[in-house]
């Protein structure tokens, strides 16, 4: 049976251009890019080319790109680094929105800092005034995501917020892991100090990510024990993965590719929403207009997420729920809880570079039947 993979927002398959670029570094060229022999210098060139491509996609300077292994590591580096900058004896304060990814929420929770969590409205939008009201004289860091990973809402408040935090000398970290590669990210224009991105959400390999650090911002490393990444992230670089990251970024930067993929994704997810919301008791969550093009979140009245996911899976359709996966069960979603909506009955289909209209058709046909059967069982 053919399958429709509609879970790109969890992880997207590897783009062929990325695989092709990686192969020589997986099968042969394996030298440490920190060595002075010509083999090492050759991998160094490949790494720096990748850095330029990633910087180019994200409107950053190559030297502002600090490669990490995952988006989670980039986020941890931002949070722990900002907290470590505080003056000795001062317990700093950090601000986060309630709808950040667990990487942000948990690193803030564990850092040696006071934390203020700013709420959102029913569409997951944060208000600039609420973030500013949370600032204190000892605030070291503000975290606001570029767009939400579960409902897709884009934080349009960021543009106004960056000027305010800069004026107050407070670092602003933007988690763009869900957004990068799907909407334009211009780190320079955004005005943020720190920005996390990850390759596997847009067809780069897993194990490649970056923290963008604005020129002039000194951030202590999170991973220590070596001078790699200009002493900002220790440990040997995963050259094949980072070369793949660069190739995926270069592909998106060429020929208006990002905009073209985004417009196809928007049409596909609009179709998903129309079909799903034609079923009684199904509504769209998040901001229907200011949203990521490739993911949508649906509230399904009366049936839990898990049997819907399993029912769709049996029909060959892979989607995720807004609820997060613990070891065996689906946990209620903190994002949806913060929005004040039912946190246990959501579905998050998402598309990406390899999604075909036939994949969407499989969802459109399977979804009403799966919901109908589950509701009939209940009745
Ligand atoms: C908004 C956001 N931040 C951070 C991450 C973590 O990225 P990674 O999977 O590369 O660790 C994710 C991935 O789910 C995400 O969606």
Image (spheres, rainbow, N blue to C red):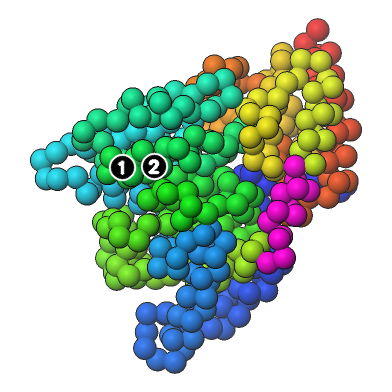
User: Pointer 2: what residue?
Assistant: 163
* Residue 268 lies in the magenta-colored region: no
Foreground pick, 373 / 224 = 224
- Residue 110 - label: none
Residue at image position (48%, 52%) is: 189
Q: As displayed, is residue 200 above or below residue 172?
A: below
Position of residue 197 measured from the top left corner of the image (x, y, whole percent): 50, 53
Residue drawn at x 71%, y 60% is 257
Residue at horizontal 40%, vertical 63%?
A: 64
- The question of residue 256 being in magenta is answered with yes
Report the residue marked by disc 1: 167
Q: Nearer the viewer, residue 329 or 35?
A: 35
Residue 207 shows in the view? no
Q: Secondary structure at mark 1?
A: helix
Q: In the shown orientation, is residue 63 left or right of residue 11?
A: left
The residue range painted magenta reads 254-266
Quadrant occupied by the C terminus: top right
Q: Residues within 10 Å of mark 1 (few under 14, many from 20)?
A: few
Residue 217 appears in which quarter of the rendering?
bottom left
Outermost bottom residue:
38
Q: Nearer the viewer, residue 186 or 53?
A: 186
Residue that protrudes farthest toward the left in the picture: 89
Mark 2 closeness class: few <14, some 14–19, many ≥20 residues within 10 Å: some
Q: Secondary structure at mark 2?
A: helix
Is residue 30 depicted above or below 311 in this figure?
Answer: below
Q: CA distance from mark 1 to mark 2?
A: 6 Å
Tell me where residue 357 appears, x and y as whole percent: 86, 46
Q: Is residue 301 above or below residue 210?
A: above
Work out whether 161 lies above or below 212. above
Q: Is residue 241 left or right of residue 220?
A: right
The chief SS type of the magenta part is helix
Mark 1 touches mark 2? (CB < 8 Å): yes
């Amino acid at each position: 049976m053919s399958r429709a993979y509609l879970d790109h927002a969890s992880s997207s398959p590897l783009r062929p251009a990325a695989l092709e670029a990686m192969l020589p570094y997986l099968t042969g060229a394996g030298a440490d890019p920190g060595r002075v022999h010509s083999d090492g210098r050759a991998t160094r060139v490949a790494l720096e080319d990748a850095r330029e491509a990633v910087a180019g996609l994200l409107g950053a300077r190559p030297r502002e790109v600090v490669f990490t292994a995952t988006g989670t590591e980039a986020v941890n580096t931002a949070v722990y680094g900002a907290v470590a900058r505080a003056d000795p004896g001062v317990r700093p304060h950090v601000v986060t929105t309630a709808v950040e990814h667990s990487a942000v929420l948990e690193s803030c929770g564990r850092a040696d800092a006071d934390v203020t969590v700013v709420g959102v409205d029913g569409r997951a939008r944060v208000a600039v005034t609420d973030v500013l009201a949370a600032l204190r004289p000892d605030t070291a860091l503000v975290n606001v995501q570029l767009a939400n990973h579960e409902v897709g809402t884009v934080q349009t408040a960021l543009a106004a917020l960056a000027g305010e935090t800069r004026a107050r000398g407070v670092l602003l970290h933007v988690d763009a892991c869900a957004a990068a590669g799907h909407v334009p990210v211009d780190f320079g224009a955004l005005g943020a100090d720190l920005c996390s991105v990850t390759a596997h959400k847009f067809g780069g390999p897993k194990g490649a990510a970056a923290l963008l650090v604005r020129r002039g911002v000194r951030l202590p490393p999170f991973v220590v024990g070596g001078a790699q990444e200009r002493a900002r992230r220790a440990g040997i670089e995963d050259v094949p993965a980072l070369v793949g990251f660069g190739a995926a970024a270069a592909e998106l930067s060429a020929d208006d590719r990002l905009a073209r993929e985004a417009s196809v994704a928007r049409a596909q997810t609009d179709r998903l929403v129309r079909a799903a919301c034609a079923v009684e008791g199904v509504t769209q969550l998040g901001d229907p207009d200011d949203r990521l093009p490739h993911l949508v979140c649906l509230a399904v009245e009366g049936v839990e997420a898990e049997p819907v996911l399993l029912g769709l899976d049996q029909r060959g359709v892979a989607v995720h729920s807004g609820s997060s996966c613990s070891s065996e069960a689906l946990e209620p979603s903190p994002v949806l809880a913060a929005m004040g909506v039912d946190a246990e009955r959501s579905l998050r289909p998402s598309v990406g570079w390899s999604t075909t209209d036939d994949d969407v058709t499989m969802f459109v046909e399977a979804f009403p039947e799966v919901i109908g059967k589950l509701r009939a069982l209940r009745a």
